[in-house]
Image (cartoon, grey):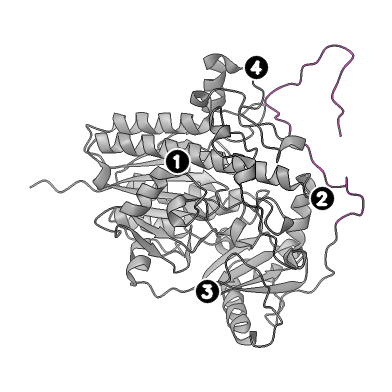
Amino acid sequence: MTAPKRPNILFLFTDQQRADSIGALGNSVMQTPHLDRLCREGTAFTSAYSPSPECVPARCSLITGAYVNHTGCASNAQAMPPEDSTPTFMSILTDAGYRTHGIGKCHFTPDSTAMRGFQTRETSEEVIDADGQSDYFDYVKNEGHGHVMEPLGIRGEMYYVPQPAQQPAELCHSHWVADRTINFINGQANDDQPWLCYAGFIHPHPPFNPPNPWHKLYRAPDMPLPHMPADFESMQCFINRFQNRYKYRDRGYDLNLLRCMRAYYNACVSFIDYQVGRIVASLEASGELDNTLILYSSDHGELLGDFGSFGKRSFHDAAAKVPLIARLPERFQAGEQCDKPASLIDIATTACAAAGESPIDQFDGVDLADLATGNSTRDTVFMQYQRGSDTLISAVGEDYKYTWSAPDQREYLFARSDSPETKDLAGVPGYAAPLTNLKQRLVAHIRDGNHAGDILDDNDEFLRQPPKQLPANPDAGLIYQDPPQHAVNLPEGYAPKKL
């Protein structure tokens, strides 16, 4: 008798998507009918956190199933562990007989074209080196839009300025990722081999540049203002102020611009939602819908003006929490919401468990199916950004979230029932016990890793150093992000100023 086919795995992964950007999970502004369907037919993990609220370290922990304190990759500037000596859940599934394919943004550092366990890839990153490869950029050029220097949006000074896409919707990245994913699904339709398909969207990462007519889906006057509670500036940490500077966002608040920014951000999410609908429809047409584990998540969130701040790299829920949905009828209850702390490191364990593969010692995560059914006793997850004097590190429990910011030489405590966060409880009478409890757990987590000396002294106290300050000159720290893959060709006598 032939054994039943193991489930396929479809992993839909966005970039910089807030956990609160899905209609079915409580956002009455958002139009996300296809993500709402996944919530109805699967389990949503409503307290899912990034292991590191920045692209490369989050993705490193995601694919290796290991926390930052074990991978050593704590920022975009740090390389992932060597490919030939570090298993990923993709390599485990490939070795287990799965057909594995990656599409879109992976952000593998230092080699953006590395396979990391995939058998095949179709590549696209936000910005590529002059000699780099991008199947998406080649596609846009071959479709007659090679004149568009930045098909993913204009960066630099325009990085956080909402802008319509310069190419039609069908040539935008999110649509391309869906096209390639549908093509892969259709190509496996008559094959008994189980498959893993990773679809990596770049949106809603800035620039926020939805295509026409999607840029009119939400209008600025209808958008809620950012979350700026009383004393919000006291709840900023150094990294908030630092990235506000280089994102050209620390010269005051234009609330109408912020509402437009949020409208365009939401449009990017809804455009992805539309692509999710196309992908799921193709999976349904292939007859493989209920034999496919669908995972939907993002690497981190986006502050979008909350706390007067922008970007990621923050312990605030707007930046640190991520959407996380799992659909496979035999393993995940339809319409359920699980509020236990979850993490992107759980994806590796969950994918391997669904495929019938035992987790490896490297994995720090749990099977999300066990978390949802109460068969996991874990009640705390951890986050880390940077090491040494720039460290931002957190422990998230069921009731509280504790953070240590080394650049500020300061700790923060938020009640998780206080969402969105309105009050820092660190030092407030009556909250010493939960603060001490989570701090002790965090210290034990750090000691379990490979770089404890970068964060703790010999007495298990956080290293002391002078707090960091931004340069007084408000133009100090501004950056350009011009694409190196295109030359800026201007007539003779004109040349862009080089900093």
* Of callouts 3 and 1, the N-terminal one: 1
Of helix, strand and loop, which one carries label 3? loop
Residue 263 visible? yes
Crowding near pointer 1: few (<14 within 10 Å), some, many (20+)? many
Closest to the camera, between mark 3 and mark 2, is 2
Residue 189, by quadrant, is: top left
Against 181, residue 414 (above or below) is below
Q: Which mark is residue 252?
A: 2
- 470 or 257, nearer to the observer: 257
Residue numbers of the magenta segment: 470-499
In the image, which disc is placed on residue 197? none
Secondary structure beneath label 2? loop
Q: Are marks 3 and 4 in contact (CB under 8 Å)?
A: no
What numbered label is drawn on residue 273?
1
Residue type at the position of mark 4: His
Magenta stretch encompasses residue 477: yes
- CA separation, marks 3 and 1? 30 Å
Camera-nearest label, 1 or 4: 1
Q: Is residue 18 left or right of residue 424?
A: left
Give the amino acid at mark 3.
Gly
Q: CA distance from mark 3 to mark 2?
A: 35 Å
Q: Which mark is residue 147?
A: 4
Q: Nearer the viewer, mark 3 or mark 1?
A: 1
**Kind of residue sitting beneath label 1:** Asp
Label of residue 397 in the image: 3
Mark 1 or mark 4, which has the lower sequence index? 4
Compared to residue 494, the image places residue 384 above or below, namely below
Q: Are marks 3 and 1 in contact (CB under 8 Å)?
A: no
SS under mark 1: helix
Q: Nearer the viewer, mark 2 or mark 1?
A: 2
Q: Earlier in the sequence, mark 2 or mark 4?
A: 4
